Amino acid sequence: MKKKLSHLALAALFGAAAVGGALAFAQGNDGLLDSLERGLWQLRAVGGGPSGAAVNQICLGDSNRLVQIQHGNTPCTQFVVRSAPNSVTISYSCKGEGQGLTTIRKESGKLIQIQSQGIRNNAPFSFSVEGRKTGTC
C-alpha cells in the first residue's frame, strides 16, 4: 500500500511540475508582443473592405490590447496556444463577455498581421487586419 501511495505522490508531483511549467511558459511568452514599438497603430482590413475589428486604430501601451481587440479593456484570461519566433496564437476568455482566438504575426517592430475570431455580445466575429505603427499617441 505504501509503495502505491508513493507512486501516486510522485505522479502528482510530476503532474504539478508539468502544469507549472506550462503556466510559466504561457505567462512568460509575451516577448514577441513586447518587442513591438509603442505608439499609435493603424489597423486596416486585409483584402479591402471593412475590417470587422472593433477599432481602426489603437494606442499601443499594453501589447495585450492587440490580443483582444474586440473586447477592449475587459479583463480576460489569456493562454498562449502556440508560439514561434515571429508569431503567437493566444486564446482568451472574458467572463460573461465572450472569448476569442487571436494570431499575431510580426513582420517588423512596426508591422504586424492579426487574425482573430470569437464571440462578443453573443454574436460571432472574425477579422484579419494589418497593423502598422503610424506615430505617437
Image: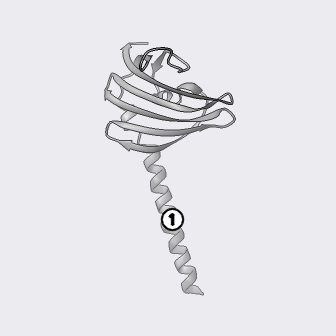
Q: Is residue 67 visible?
A: no
Q: Please, is residue 61 above or below residue 25 in the view? A: above
Q: How many numbered badges does the structure rendering display?
A: 1
Structure colour scheme = one colour
Q: Please, is residue 93 above or below residue 7 in the view? A: above
Please provide percent x and percent y for residue 66.
47, 27
Please indicate whether residue 3 sits to the left or right of residue 108 in the image: right
Q: Residues within 10 Å of mark 1 (few under 14, many from 20)?
A: few
Please provide percent x and percent y for residue 137.
44, 12
Q: Which amino acid, mark 1?
A: Gly
Q: Please, is residue 74 above or below residue 31 in the view? A: above
Q: Please, is residue 17 above or below residue 34 in the view? A: below
Residue pictured at 50% horizontal, 18% vertical: 51
Q: Which residue in the structure is indicated by mark 1?
A: 15
Please provide percent x and percent y for residue 43.
44, 18
Please provide percent x and percent y for residue 65.
50, 27
Q: Is residue 18 visible?
A: yes
Where does the N terminus fall, quadrant-wise? bottom right
Q: For this rendering, which residue is in front, 122 or 25?
A: 122
Residue pictured at 31% horizontal, 28% vertical: 107
Residue pictured at 52% horizontal, 62% vertical: 16
Quadrant of residue 2 within the rendered picture: bottom right
Helix, strand or loop for disc 1: helix
Please indicate whether residue 135 sits to the left or right of residue 53 in the image: left
